[in-house]
Amino acid sequence: MTTPANPQPATKDLRSRPIQVEVRGQGGYTVTGTLFIDSLTAGARARRALRTFAILFGLAVVSVPIPPIHWLLVPGFLIASIVMFFVRLATPELLRGDVPCPKCHTTFPLESQPPTWPLDLTCHQCKAQLTAVPLP
C-alpha cells in the first residue's frame, strides 16, 4: 500500500502517526502498506462526543410526533445518545487511511475506527475478506 499524497497534518487537537500494516487475503495473498493513527486531545474527543449526542438527541425529538413507533424510537435514540456520548468520549485514537486489496490490487478508504487488531475488512471492489495486522 502506498502512502497517501497528502496525509492529514497534525493540528493542536490531532496528532497523526503512520503505522505499517500487512493486509492478508484469502488464498495467501499479502501486501504491505501504511495507515495512520490519529491521537485526539480531550477537547477534540469532547466535541466529537457532543456532536454525536446532539444528532441522536435531535433524532429523538424529531421522532416524538410519529405514532405509534415513537414509543420505541424516542427511548432508543435517547439511550443511544447517552451510550454513544461515553463511547466517543473514551476513544482516544482513530485509524484512517487507504487499504490496498492484495487480490484485485485496488485501494479503498478505511472507515474511521478505533485501532483494534487484527482488522477484519472487506474489499469494496472484489468483496474479498481481508485481515490487516500491524508490522513490528
Image (cartoon, rainbow, N blue to C red):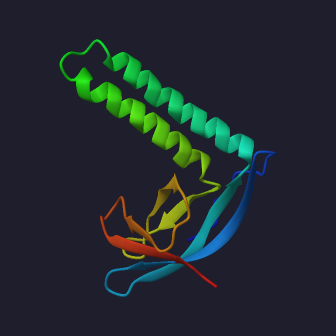
Q: Nearer the viewer, residue 127 or 47?
A: 47
Q: Does residue 13 lie above or below 126 as drawn?
A: above
Tell me the quadrant of the picture where the N terminus can be found.
bottom right
State the count of labels: 0
Q: Nearer the viewer, residue 87 or 51?
A: 87
Looking at this view, name the residue that lies furthest to the top: 65
The spot of residue 98 in percent (x, y) is 53, 61
Q: Residue at x 69, y 67 (%)?
A: 18
Q: Nearer the viewer, residue 30 or 62?
A: 62
The spot of residue 48 in percent (x, y) is 61, 39
The spot of residue 73 in percent (x, y) is 29, 28
The spot of residue 53 in percent (x, y) is 52, 32
Q: Residue at x 72, y 64 (%)?
A: 17
Q: Residue at x 60, y 53 (%)?
A: 91
Q: Nearer the viewer, residue 98 or 49?
A: 49
Evaluate whether residue 5 shows in this view: no
Evaluate whether residue 135 shows in this view: yes
Looking at this view, name the residue that lies furthest to the left: 68
Q: Does residue 82 lie above or below 117 as drawn?
A: above
Q: Residue at x 32, y 81 (%)?
A: 26
Q: Quadrant of residue 2?
A: bottom right
Looking at this view, name the residue that lies furthest to the bottom: 28
Tell me the quadrant of the picture where the C terminus can be found.
bottom right
Relative to 65, 104 lies left or right: right
